[in-house]
Amino acid sequence: MNKNYKIDLHIHTNVNPHAFSTLEENIRAASRKGMKVIAITNHGPALPDSPHWWHLANIAILPEVIEGVRVLKGVEANILDENAKLDINQNVYERMEIILAGFHTVDEYEDTRDILKNTNAILNLIKSQKADIIVHLGNPIFPVDYEKIVKAAKENSVALEINNTSLGTLTRVGSRKNCKKMLELAKKEGCYIVLGSDSHYSDHIGEFTNAIKLIEEVGYPEELILNSSVENLENFLKLRKGLRPKEINS
């Protein structure tokens, strides 16, 4: 198994002030580490310390390659309701090369312990095809039915993230058991997965130690891990581009 993944699709900059590195610091760190592809995926505006949508949309001005690193323009959108509404507008949506989405504790989404509501929200999002990757689904404060979600992800060619930060001791504590269950189901179905550092500090880019241990336990097929090669990722992004609806509110 490739233990030296050089693709990281979940990175934040300090335009979300709970992160600590600038865009340039992140790119320099990625270049120094020999990363091939990174995605800048700042939080959508439902979180109180997120930038104006103008900033999120204007990421499109960045060159494709900076300091030898392919820089994907992305966002980590927030799920706002059971009907798969996201907190990004059409301007942001059209400019994104990759769209991550997941649950965060925001004013618009309450009753987080409601497994039926949470599951329906994810299922509706997957079926809508508006998001390419569903992130940190192991979070125990947002319980879901993994069997239903994994089947829907497979049927709709949506990837599921194994969030390295969630497998540590500070954030979304208690996720590991849920992530392992999800991985085992995903392996049976043949789902795409992605390892995400969820970096909020430049030196954490490409840090997948906890996630790698988990996929090794499960014996996850390398060809279904989007970080495993640029070719795998490019094929996935091409597929997803053809599946996304033209309008975020369609």
Image (cartoon, grey):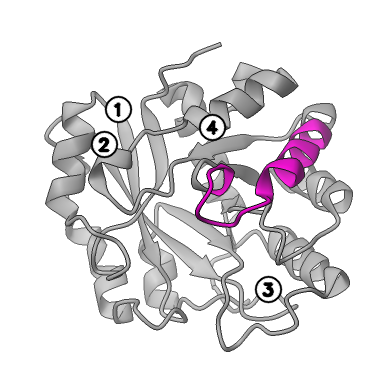
- The amino acid on which the numbered mark 2 sits, given as a three-letter code, is Arg
At 69% across and 65% down in the image, what residue appears? 125
Q: Are marks 2 and 4 in contact (CB under 8 Å)?
A: no
Q: CA distance from mark 3 to mark 1?
A: 32 Å
Disc marking residue 194: none
Residue 150 found in image quarter? top right
Pointer 1 local density, CA inside 10 Å: few below 14, some 14–19, many at least 20: some
Q: Position of residue 47 (x, y in %)?
A: 44, 79
State whether residue 132 is above or below residue 14.
above
* Upstream in sequence: badge 3 or badge 1: 1
Taking the image as drawn, is residue 220 in sight? no
At 40% across and 83% down in the image, what residue appears? 48
Q: CA distance from mark 2 to mark 1?
A: 6 Å
* Upstream in sequence: badge 2 or badge 1: 1
Image quarter in which the C terminus is found: bottom right
- The amino acid on which the numbered mark 3 sits, given as a three-letter code, is Ala
State whether residue 108 is above or below residue 250.
below
Q: Which residue is mark 3?
A: 84
Q: Which residue is mark 2?
A: 70
* Upstream in sequence: badge 2 or badge 4: 2
Residue 205 found in image quarter? top left
Q: Is residue 123 left or right of residue 23?
A: right
- The amino acid on which the numbered mark 4 sits, given as a three-letter code, is Asn
The magenta-colored residue range is: 166-186
Q: Which residue is mark 1?
A: 36
Q: Compare residues 66 and 103 and report the one nearer the observer.
A: 103
Q: CA distance from mark 2 to mark 4?
A: 25 Å
Q: Which residue is mark 4?
A: 210
Tag 2, which secondary structure?
strand
Q: CA distance from mark 4 to mark 1?
A: 21 Å
